[in-house]
Structures are given as structure tokens and as C-alpha cells.
Image (cartoon, rainbow, N blue to C red):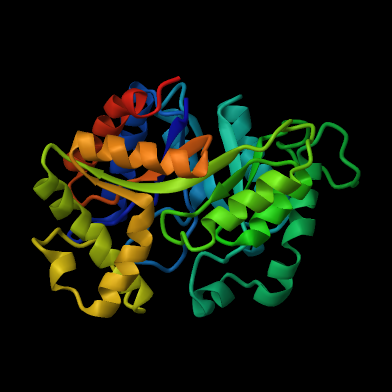
Amino acid sequence: MTKLSILDLSPVCEGGTPADSFRNSLSLAQHGEALGYQRYWLAEHHGMPGIASAATAVLLAYIGAGTSTIRIGAGGVMLPNHSPLVIAEQFGTLESLYPGRVDLGLGRAPGSDQRTAQALRRDLQSDSDRFPQDVIELMDFMSKTPRQPVMAVPGRGLEVPIWILGSSTFGAQLAAHLGLPYAFASHFAPQQMMQAIQIYRETFKPSAQLAKPYVMLGFNVFAADTDAEAQFRASSWQQAFVNLRSGRPGRLPPPVEGYREKAGPQERALLDSVLSCSAVGTPETVREDVAAFIAKTGADELMVTSQVFDHAARLRSYEILASVMEEAVPA
């Protein structure tokens, strides 16, 4: 059966603070653990008023302390922002604290705008070009028999599972070449999803970590007891997505009635694209949409995000998805 996992950006809602977001993130992780979700991931972003997960490893330590069985990880760490040694130490620390529960997803984008990326003191062009080499170096730091003299402590020998993230075919090619699991960001950039999946599966080379291809796909879910409520709850994310793509990033806004219908043609076209990897509606609607998406893609796992303004409604959305999943995709 296709597994379910949670992707959290630790959203900062209008009228809220990052401290509120962190408490909500822990609540969501605990909720997902109780519902049987496979893993809980946080994504690294910088300079965005509505996303509080910039210090990803620090926040994961907080999440790990408040949970006991769900896997925790990064979806992902934007490796061009960091030296491989630092990430090996950070995730070696997490693995030492929560053995057997930590994942490390790696992305090639900076997770910020150009000005913020420069404030991170990185040479974007050269560091992005070095991404494959940096991934290999990071894996070596955490291997049992590293080739380099510098030692990651903690980190060495812990072999934290590595995932490659992407929203284009580049990540698919790299993940296949290295024999690593692949997570595609179809929840916000679905355009190259099917091509990337095909390339990854057709060119995959088995590795010590993974014997056969494993695909995880991002998917938006806004589930509620009525279609009207689900559409209403989804409008917060729709507003935030349009604002971000229009160069106006902000905090997650309250929902509004009929947002998509009132939006202009450019905004509706943008939302139509990303909604192709989404389920919005009642349990029955969500069940059908999830089943159709898995049938189309053959996804081994769904990394589900639900950017809902009201925290209780957000928890309910994940609860509904978990309850319909067995019917949607029988074993």
C-alpha cells in the first residue's frame, strides 16, 4: 500500500508568531504519529515571512523530543547553503538523539530569493554546480569507512538515509545514478513530474542504500466534512501561493469565500496547474483523487502538505486522509 507522510513548512499565520508555528508543528507531528503516518519532514526556506522552518535541524530536534516512532527529517536541506560537513554533524546529532528515525532529503535550490541567498554567504552559481559532488561528500562523511581525513563527529558511521529532492529532471538523474530514493515536488511544481519519474525509474542503479527505485511525490490535501468547507480552507494556501509567485510573500492569510472564482485569469491558470496534484473536498472526493493520482504515477509514497489557517481544521484534514487511505489504495 502507498505510504503517507507529512510535509510541514511550519506556516506562520497572519496574527501569529513563529513560536505559535513551532507548537503547531509539534502538534501536527504527534497527530501524524498517532494516525500512522510514515514520516514527518520540514523544509528549509529563508527570508519568507510565512515559513518558520529556516533552522531545520534545530526544529527537528524539538519535534523528535516530542515524538517517539514517526520518522523525522528534512524535505529538504538546501545543500548549496551549507558545507557538507556541517550537515553531516547536524544530522549525525539528530540520528544520535533519535536513532533509526532520521531522514535527510537534499535539495539543490537555495530556498530563498537571490538577495537572501547572498546573505547566507554562498556563491550560488558555483555551489549549485557542485551539488552532486557535495552530496557524495556528505554521504562519505556519514559512511562507516570515509575516504577523507576530516571526521564528522557525530555523523561518521551513522549512515543517515539520504533522499534526493527535485522539481525537474536533474534531481531524477542524480538520484538514479546514486541509487537513492527520489522525492519530487509535485505539490508546487508538477510540470515535469511524469518525465522525471520515468527517467528515474528507467535509469536507476541499485546501491547499498536502495535495491530498486522508490518514488515519493508531494501532494496537497484539503479535506473536510463538506466540499464547501474544504474549498474555503484551501483558499488560504491558494492566496499564499499566488502571493509568493507574484513576488509578494507573506504570512498565511485567513480563508476567504470564493477566492479562486474571484481571481484573475493569470491567477486561476497558476492555481489550475498546481491543483493537478491536489485533492480538495469531502472524504469521498479525497479518496477518489488520491486513488487516481497513485494510479497515474505509481507513487510508492505521498508526502502530503495541507496549508490550512485554522490548526484544528488542518489536523482534521490529515485525519480524514488517513481514514480513507486504505479504501483508496488497498494492499
Q: Is residue 54 above or below residue 88?
A: below
Q: Is residue 108 above or below residue 28?
A: below
Number of marks in the image? 0
- The one of 165 and 186 positioned closer to us in this rendering: 186
Tell whether 284 sits left or right of 219: left
Question: Which residue is at 35% across, 23% downward?
Answer: 326
Q: Is residue 273 above or below residue 34?
A: below
Q: Residue 232 location in percent, x, y?
A: 13, 54
Q: Residue 274 location in percent, x, y?
A: 37, 61
Question: Which residue is at 53% across, 45% downward?
Answer: 74
Q: Quadrant of the C terminus?
A: top left
Q: Quadrant of residue 320?
A: top left
Q: Residue 271 location in percent, x, y?
A: 30, 65
- The one of 89 and 10 positioned closer to us in this rendering: 10
Question: Which residue is at 54% across, 54% downward?
Answer: 194
Q: Residue 288 location in percent, x, y?
A: 29, 38
Q: Is residue 106 visible?
A: no
Q: Is residue 203 visible?
A: yes
Question: Which residue is at 83% across, 31% downward?
Answer: 144
Tell whether 111 sits left or right of 134: left
- The one of 233 and 194 positioned closer to us in this rendering: 194
